Amino acid sequence: MISHGDSTQATSNFSIKDCQPETDPTSAFWRSAPVTFLTRDAFGKPLPGLSTEVRSRWTLTHLYLLFTCPYDTLRLNPDPVTLTKTNKLWEWDVAEVFLGSDFNNIRRYKEFEVSPQGEWVDLDVDLDSPNHEEGWVWSSGFEVASRIDPSKCIWYGSMRIPFSAIDSRPASPGNMLRINFFRSDGPGRSLVAWQPTMKPTFHVPEAFGTLLLEKGARQKTDNKAR
């Protein structure tokens, strides 16, 4: 299934088995997964050269995401650390997802980031907290994997997020989450968004779309963005 950038709902299909974060979109785990495209900047301007794919699957315990990110020039942290989280990782090239399960208090959600070098950070965001920046000390237990393919100028970032970190409900078909996908790219800091926020920040929960957990896997018939 293809979910284009002008849709406000993305989908994730079920896998009976968990696995480690996987960065190959042609693998058995990922090849039948729904694809969502990030095609615009934060203000809705098309960014055809940076069109980014996000695949999603879920199990009873985890939500899985795979970002496929074309690039011209990477903006990388010269001193990467992968064993612990990197605060302010968003100052470099990253793929990001904002996730919320509370449809009443939409200003409370979680943020997850992965870099091309396998750096990561997770944050508990409460926009009504006077010190919401302190949310980066929260720990979700999520895992990441990254891979750079310089021959194709594409990098891949995979996330495995425990449902216990993002939702109090048991994972089940039909469950909905509030979500937005983002990417920071290159020396000029291009900001790529699934749902444009129309502001120079990603932290606009009113702009979130939704993610639907689906039971069955669907075969894709087309993998090109419009």
Image (tube, rainbow, N blue to C red):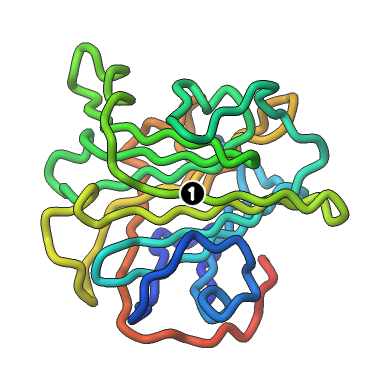
Q: Residue at x 31, y 68 (%)?
A: 212
Which residue is identified by label 1? 144
Asked whether, in this view, residue 65 is left or right of residue 214, the answer is right
Looking at the image, residue 225 lies above or below residue 114: below
Q: Is residue 74 visible?
A: yes
Task: Give residue 97's position: percent from left, percent from top.
Answer: 43, 45
- The disc labelled 1 sits on which kind of residue? Val
Would you say 86 lies left or right of 177 here? Answer: right
Residue farthest to the right, as pictured: 151
Tell me the residue at 55%/28% (across/down).
81
- Per the image, label 1 sits on a secondary structure element best described as strand
- Location of residue 83 with respect to 58 vertically, above or below: above
Of residues 9 and 13, which is closer to you in this image?
13
Q: Can you see residue 48?
A: no
Q: Residue at x 56, y 81 (%)?
A: 28
Estimate the x, y position of residue 79 in percent, counting from the top left: 65, 22
Q: Is residue 75 above or below residue 67?
A: above
Q: On the image, which quarter does residue 19 sit in? A: bottom left
Q: How many marks?
A: 1
Residue at x 67% of width, y 32% of height: 190
**Where's residue 125, x and y in %?**
27, 30
Q: Position of residue 206 (x, y in %)?
A: 31, 40
